[in-house]
Amino acid sequence: MGAVISTHLDESRRLYISEKTGKVLGEFCQFYEDQYGVALFNSIRYEIEGNGGPQSQLLHRKVPLEDRIILSGNLFQYVEENKKWRNRFCVVPHNYGLVLYENTLAYDRGIQPRVALNSAGYKILTSLDQYLDLVNSSLPGTAPKSSNAPILKCPTQFPLILWHPYSRHYYFCVMTGKEQDKWRAVFQDCVRHCNNGIPEDSTVEAPAFTDAIRMYRQSKEQYGTWDMLCGNEVQVLSNLVMEELVPELKNTIGPKLKGKAQERQRLWIQISDAVYRLISDQIKAHYDAMVTKCELERPRMESTIRTDMDQIITSKEHLASKIRAFVLPKAEICVRNHVQPYIPSILEALMTPTSQGFAEVREVFFKEVTDMNMNVINESGMESLGEHMEKLSQLAFHPVKMQSCYEKMDQLKLEGLQQRFDVSSASVFKQRAQILMREQMDDAVHTFGTLLHQELGKMLGKEELCKSIQRILERVLKKYDYDSSTVRKKFFREALLQITVPFLLKKLAPTCKGELPKFQELIFEDFDSFILVENTYEEVVLQSVMKDIMQAVKEAAVQRKHNLYRDSMVMHNSDPNLHLLGEGTPIDWGEEFGSQPDSDPATEKRRRAKQVVSVIHDDEGALPYEAGAGVLMHQVSQEEPDSEEPETCLALAAPGSPDDVQEIRGMLVQEVRVETRVLAGEEAKEQLTNGTIVQLSAGSEVCGAEEAAPSAEEGPAPLEHSARPDAGSLYPVNPEVEEQEAKPAVLASPAVPPALAAAPGLAEEGAEVNRHEPNDKETGEEVTSQGQAEKGEPAQLAPESGAGAPESGAGAPENSQGTTESGVGAPESSKGTTESSEGLQTQF
C-alpha cells in the first residue's frame, strides 16, 4: 500500500503541496504579526485598567487532575498494517490524550506506547453505518452503492470509530453495550477537551492566533463559525491548509484511484493522512520560527505601549469615531432588517438545552453529596469520609456521570438559522457549553470540599457531621445558582455575537470594506502596530448589535423557566475568608483521612501507587473480553508454540484468514461463556467506582436539602468590560463591551501516574516502576510500522505542542457584614425589593 501512495504522491505533487502550504503560511504569518501587536496592547491595557465583571462565588481549583488517569482498560483495535484485530491497553491520562500500549505488561514495564493520539477534530461513531456515510461523502468521485462490501468488518456488535476529515481513522470495538457507552463518553470527553481551543493562560498569543485565523478566512470570503478551529496551533493551521488543498487533490488524484469501492475508500484515507502529516511537519517548523520572531519584538513593543498608553487610546478612539460615523448608519439598518427579528428565536434555541444542562449539573452534584452523606452515616463516619471525598473531588471529570448533563446540549438545534447566518453546525456551541458545565461542577465540588475540610477541624460526631455536610451543601448550591446564571448569560451573549457579527460583516463587506483603507491615514505611524483599521471596524459592527443582544438576554433573565438572575441582582459575598481557604495547599483526602495512623508513610505511598488511581474503574474484576483475550492468547500459543512475543499474540483472526469475522465472533462468544459469571438484578449493572454505593439501613434518616432562594438588592447594571477576548470562543467579543471571563482551572503539569495493578510476574510489592508517561506537549502520534509491530518494538513519540489547556483561577473574595451561617448566597434585604423571594428562587 505504501508503494501505491508513493505513486499518487510523487515528487512533483509533494513539491506542489509544500509550495501551497508555504503560500498559506506566508499569508497567515502577516495576519499573525499584525494581530500580535493588537493583542499585546489589549493585554497590557486590561492589566492597567483591571475592569472586571461579577465576582465568582465559587472557588476555582488550579490543578484538578494532577497524577490522575481518567480511564484505563483494554480495547480491541483494528491494526491496518496487518489487517488484524488486536487487544490494546488504552490509558487516558490527565491531559486527555489517548495512549495505546501493546498490553498491560508493556504499560507496567514503562515501554513506550504504540500510539499517542490528540483527538482534536475527531468524531466518535458507534455504528458502521454512520462511518460509511461519512467515508462515502468524502470519497472522490461517485459515491459507491450501498450494496458494496463495507470498508471494515467488526468482530463484535459494539464498534467505536474515531473519524477525522483529513487524518487517520482509528477502529476499536468492545464486548458489551455498557462498555461501549463508557468508552464513548470518555472519548467524547477527550475530543471536547482537545477542541476547547488555545490555552487561555496565554493572553497575547492565543487571541493573536484566533484573530489571525479569522482574518485570513475572511480574506478568502469565508465568514461564520468554523468546525475545524480545534486543537493546538499546528493542528488548526494544518486544517486550514487542508481545507484549501483537499478539493484540488480530489480532482487530480480521485479519478486515478482504482479497485473496488472499499479499496478506493481505504486508499483515499491513507493518502489524505499522508498529506496531512507532510503539511503538519512543515507547519510546525515555520510556526515556531514565526512565534520566536514575535517574542523577540515583544520587549520593544511593550515598552512603547506602557510609555504611550494614553496617546494610543486617544488615537484609537479618534479612529473609531470616524469609522463609526461611516459604518454605523448602514450597520443599524442591516441589524434592524436582518438580525433583530431573529435574536429571540436564536436565544430561545440556545437557552433551553443550556439551562437544562446546568440544572442537571446541579442535580448530579446534589445527588452525589447526598449519597455520600448517607454512606458516611451508614459506615464509620469520619473513617470513610476520606475515601468518599476522594471520589467526589473528581466528579466533574467522570465522563459517565457527567454524560447526563452533556446530553442535554444534544437538543440544541439551529437548522432553521444555520443557512441564514452561515453557521456551519451547532457543535461549537454544544462543546463550549459542556466545557462550562464541567468547570462549574468542579468549582462546586472544590468549594464544597474546602468548606467541609474547614468544618472538620471541630472534631464532629457522626450526627454533627451529617448536619454540617447538609448545611454546606445548601451554601454551595446557592453559590452555584448565582455563578451558573452569570456563566450562562455570558455564554448566550458570546454565542449570539459569534452567530450575528460574521453575518453582518459579510452583508456590509460590499459597501464598507473597500472604503476602509482611507482611514489608515488617521493612525500615527508609531502606533500602527497596535491599532488596526480592520479590527476597529469589526468593533464598530459588534457595537451595532450588542445593544439588542444585551437587551434580549436581560429580558430572558426575568423568565423564571430559565433560572437566571436579573442583571440588577447583586450577590453579596458572605464568606470573607473563603478565598484564603482556596489559596491553601490542595486537600489530599485519601492521605489525610484514608490511611491507618500506624502505617509507614513510605509503605502507604507505594501501596497507593499500586492501585488503579483512575477517575473511572470497575470493581467487578476483569472485563469479559479481557478474560477472553487470555483464552485467545492460550489458544494462539498452542497453535504457535515458537512465537517470539506471546504478549502480542492476541490477534483475533486466524493466520490464514485475517478477515474471518464469523470465526472471531464465535471465539469471543466462547470466551464470554467461559469467564463471565452471571449477575442478577442490580448486580448485573456495570459499576463505576468513582461514585459511592448508597447503603440504606432500616430507619435511617437523611437531612433534607432545603433550597433557600437568595434575596437580592436592586442596584445598577453596568456594562462589564474586558480587554481580552475569550480564547475558547470561535469569534472573540468586543473587549470594551463584554464582561471579564472567569478563568477555568489549570490542568496539571506532566506527571507520571501511579502504577496500575501489576500483572503476574512483575515487580514485587512496593518496587518502583519507571513508566513512560506522554506529557501535555505530545499531541501528535506515531504508529509503529508493520515490521515494528511484529517484532514488538516500541513506537517513538513525536513531540508536539500541548493540547491541554493550562488555566488559572483565583478564589473569589467574599465580603459581607452581619450575615447568618446559612445565608451564604445573599443576605436577606429588608428594604423592600421589587421581587418576592419566591420569584428569586433558582430551584432546578
Image (cartoon, rainbow, N blue to C red):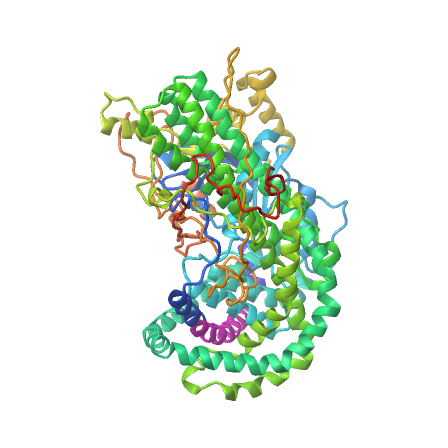
Please state the horizontal and vertical placement of residue 487, each as a whole percent of the image. Answer: 54, 50
The span shown in magenta is 9-38
What residue is rendered at 47% in x and 82% in y?
315
Q: Quadrant of residue 752?
A: top left
What residue is rendered at 42% in x and 72% in y?
41
Relative to 533, residue 194 above or below: above
Give the farthest residue toward the front: 831
Pick whichever, 670 or 224, lies toward us: 224
- Asked if residue 653 can be seen in this view, the reply is no
Please state the horizontal and vertical placement of residue 468, each as a whole percent of the image. Answer: 42, 27
Pick whichever, 820 or 535, lies toward us: 820
Relative to 19, residue 707 above or below: above
Relative to 362, residue 721 above or below: below
Q: Quadrant of the C terminus?
A: top right
Is residue 408 located in the magenta-colored stretch of the structure? no
- Asked if residue 467 can be seen in this view, the reply is yes
Q: Is residue 262 left or right of residue 604?
A: right
Pick whichever, 791 or 33, lies toward us: 33
Count of numbered circles in the view: 0
What residue is rendered at 35% in x and 48% in y?
749
Relative to 622, residue 802 above or below: below
Q: Quadrant of residue 420?
A: bottom right
Please state the horizontal and vertical placement of residue 403, each as a whole percent of the image. Answer: 57, 38
Pick whichever, 110 or 751, lies toward us: 751
Please state the horizontal and vertical placement of residue 392, each as a whole percent of the image. Answer: 45, 32
Tell me which secondary structure the magenta stretch mostly adopts: helix
